[in-house]
Amino acid sequence: MTTLTQRIQYLAESETLAMSRKSRELKALGHDVINLSLGEPDFNTPDYIKEAAKEAIDKNFTFYPPVAGYEDLRKAICLKLKRDNNLDYECNQIVVSTGAKQSIANVVLSLVNPGDEVLVPAPYWVSYKEIIKVAEGKAVFIPATIENDFKVTPQQLEAAITPKTRLLIYSSPCNPTGSVYSRDELKGIAEVIVKYPNITIIADEIYEHINFIGKHESICQFDFIKDRVVLVNGVSKGFAMTGWRIGFIAAPVDIAKACDKLQGQFTSGASSIAQRAALKAFATAPDDTPDMKIMLKAFRERRDLMLKLLAEIPGMKLNHPDGAFYIFPDISCYFGKSDGKTNVANANDLCLYLLNKVYVALVPGDAFGDPRCIRFSYATGIDKLTEAVRRIKQALEELR
């Protein structure tokens, strides 16, 4: 039998992908499964972006692209950052990767040595913890509460800093909670980190365009901390381009060069055709994109519906998410209950109970650093969402 490395043995499978796999297995057996586990818009990529990809094929963009991305794409990203966020970057500060996940991994592997500490506000996106493991760093989790809209305070942040702290990584809008940090809240975080010259911030802004409260706020807007921030973004969520696999960083030049070097050995440049599609996406202002407005309107309507329906379930505690397409309720009041056949001790048990009993796939909060909660993705149609909550309510009524 092959002996695998400790690195791969310690690495956990993505729980979102694991839950999706289980739901597919049940579906293959003929069950009517409603999958609310994946963070993927249910909209098609806009036609004008698809046309750009077809044109790229016809124009023979079929050779190896530069490792950091085509220069015109990186220029378009710089223009996007100026147009949408009033941020100034040069081409040599941009590295395009095969999705924002690779962008984050590049940065962590470039900055974290074995034993270095990475501050991770919890709840957090599942892959942060595992990427830190691969770098042999130590994740230091800072718990946020539903009462504080799942957002950490500057005081909590400062209390977690030690001489070994190397990075802070967070997302806003947040996966899994949908929480959005305000300008003042981000400034408070920046004012803490600026006091510690060895700490870099990774600001995961992949859900920038799925924001229900107006203008997106980036921590990069504060000049006193900008040269210590790596901004991560991409096309997957806001442009419904998950399968195209294009993400990017905007970073200090030394970090961008390090990520270019690392990526050159791992994957080289991202797909040439996907890059040409992304160029079209970034070149178009959000206000000029009807598809984006339609998608945002739909997500807002779904969020409002889900909050209304879930609030009718006894014992379910909710915050009011202002972005992304997730709801992350505290369902701990159901722990220790049973329907006579299945005992529910924790969130994982509850998710498996709901999947096996009423065929609704959710993700337990343990995967995101809060074992009291479960994650709903409302990136599916109104009818399915309504039916899913009806089934869940029925199943939970049977727990005593």
Image: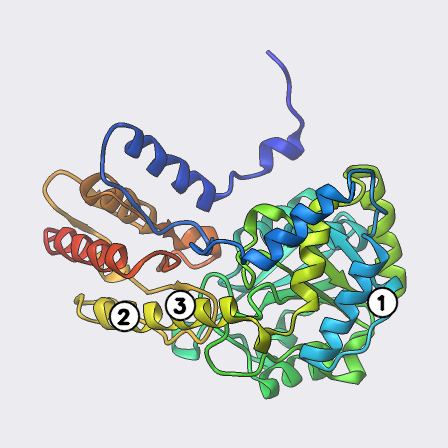
Q: Name the residue that disc number 3 marks.
A: 299
Residue 30 position within the rendered picture, expressed as x and y whole percent measured from the top left: 23, 30
Q: Is residue 349 above or below residue 330?
A: above
Give the CA separation, mark 1 to mark 2. 42 Å
The residue drawn where x is 56% and y is 53% is 241
Name above or below for residue 213 compared with residue 377.
Answer: below
Residue 245 x %, y %: 63, 48
**Badge 2 local density, few (<14 within 10 Å), some, or many (20+)?**
some
| Residue position marked by numbered label 1 in the rendering | 252
Q: Residues within 10 Å of mark 3 (few under 14, many from 20)?
A: many
Amino acid under disc 3: Phe
Which of the two discs, 1 and 3, sits closer to the camera? 3
**Which quarter of the figure has residue 134?**
top right
Residue shown at 47%/66% (left/top)?
A: 324
Residue kind at label 1, given as amino acid type: Pro
Q: Amino acid at mark 2?
A: Leu
Residue 149: quarter of image: bottom left
Residue 305, disc: 2
Please give left or right for residue 393 compared with residue 58 in the image. left
Q: Earlier in the sequence, mark 1 or mark 2?
A: 1
